[in-house]
Amino acid sequence: MDSLEDQIFADFQPELEEIFRVKKELLLLRRSVTPLRDVFNTLLRREQPIFSRETHTYFQDVFDHLIRVADTIDTLRDMVGSMMDAYLSISGNRMNLIMKRLTSIATILMSVTLVAGIYGMNLEYMPELKWRYG
């Protein structure tokens, strides 16, 4: 995640596919962890203890770890969403800069084309045709 963030803000090198790949992996992890968390929650909340008190302690520890992992996965998914927004924002800003350059070049070339279009015609009645330097 940190290397993706650095690539986005430093030299803008990551591909959008790489961000989607990370997001997909996090979704797969979440799909794996969430059912386990629910199963351990059910095992711990039973009124009739199936396992010994000692085993119950271990299950509680595993359940706490599953909660932490699920929270970490959710945090990372939020970060990936923010990174995707940042990526799209940066690419939009870069496209705006390119469009500004292209617009200025087109404006300059358009005025030159206008002058060449008016004075490059082979007509009898043209402005300045009968002038000395026309």
Image (tube, rainbow, N blue to C red):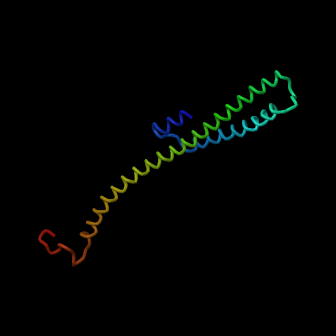
Q: Residue furthest left?
A: 132
Task: Please give the count of numbered marks on the rendered protein.
Answer: 0
Residue sitting at x 57%, y 35%: 1
**Residue 25 or 42: which is nearer the viewer?**
42
Residue sitting at x 30%, y 64%: 113
- Is 103 left or right of 17, judged from the image as shown? left
- Is 55 left or right of 25, judged from the image as shown? right
**Residue 17 or 96: which is nearer the viewer?**
96
- Is 125 left or right of 132, judged from the image as shown? right
Q: Position of residue 84 (x, y in %)?
A: 54, 44
Q: Position of residue 44 (x, y in %)?
A: 80, 31
Residue sitting at x 67%, y 41%: 27
Q: Quadrant of residue 55?
A: top right
| Quadrant location, the C terminus | bottom left
Q: Position of residue 82 (x, y in %)?
A: 55, 42
Above/below status of 110 relative to 11: below
**Residue 100 or 89: which is nearer the viewer?**
89
Q: Residue furthest top?
A: 54
Residue sitting at x 67%, y 31%: 68
Q: Quadrant of residue 33?
A: top right
Q: Residue furthest front?
A: 47
Q: Position of residue 29 (x, y in %)?
A: 69, 37
Q: Residue furthest bottom?
A: 124
